[in-house]
Amino acid sequence: MPKHRVTWIVIADSSRAQIVTLREDQTGFDIVTALQSADAHASSHDLGVDRPGRMQESANPAHHAIEPRVDAHEQSTLEFLRMVAQYLNENATSTDVRSLILFAPPRALGHLRKMLNAAVTRKIRAAAPKDLTRVPFADLPKHLEALP
C-alpha cells in the first residue's frame, strides 16, 4: 500500500470491480485490486435448480410450479457486492486511504452503499451511478472531472 494518503476509485458492476488510485505523478492509474465474481458468466442452471419446484393444489389434483423467492443471478450479484464491501470495510479504513469515489450502475451502487460500514461511508467523497467497468483508464479523468 502506498505511503502517502490516496483516494481510492472504486469501479464496479454486478460481477467485476477494480479499485484504482491516481499515480503520484498524475500520469495514470495504479490498480490496488481487481475482484471478479466466480458466478459472473454462469447460467441459471449452474447457479441453482434448473426448473422450479412443484406443488399440488389442495382443491384439485393440478400441480403448479413454485417460483423461487430470489432470482439466482440477483443472489449472485448480492454475494459479489458483499465481497466488494467486505474488502472496502477491511482495507479502506486505513489511514493511508483519504477518500473514496464510487462508480457503479444505480442498482449495484445502492446495494454497495448499504453494505459499507460507517467508517468507510464517511470517506466517500463522491458516487456516480455509472458503469465504467469497460471504460479505458485513459478516459477515466473525463468522468472524474464531471463529478460534483
Image (cartoon, rainbow, N blue to C red):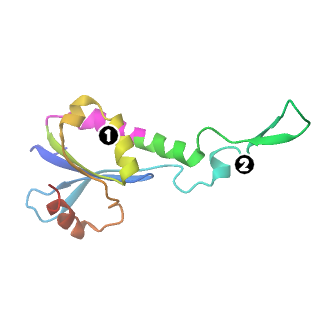
**Percent position (x, y) of residue 145?**
14, 62
Question: Rounded to the nearest whole Å, what is the CA distance between mark 2 and mark 1?
Answer: 32 Å
Q: Is residue 138 left or right of residue 87?
A: left
Chain part drawn in magenta: 82-95
- Name above or below for residue 8 compared with residue 96: below
Residue depicted at x 47% and y 40%: 79
Question: In terms of image quadrants, where is residue 24?
Answer: bottom left
Circle 1 — which element?
Answer: helix
Q: Is 83 a magenta residue?
A: yes
Q: Is 68 a magenta residue?
A: no
Magenta stretch prevailing secondary structure: helix
Question: In terms of image quadrants, where is residue 42?
Answer: bottom right
Check disc 2 and give the amino acid type. Answer: Asp
**Percent position (x, y) of residue 46?**
65, 49
**Percent position (x, y) of residue 134?**
36, 65
First in sequence, mark 2 or 1: give its number: 2
- Classed neighbour count for the residue bearing mark 1: other residues with Cα under 10 Å, few (<14), some (14–19), many (≥20): some
Circle 2 — which element?
Answer: loop
Check disc 1 and give the amino acid type. Answer: Arg
Label number found at residue 50: 2
Label 1 belongs to which residue?
A: 113
Label number found at residue 35: none
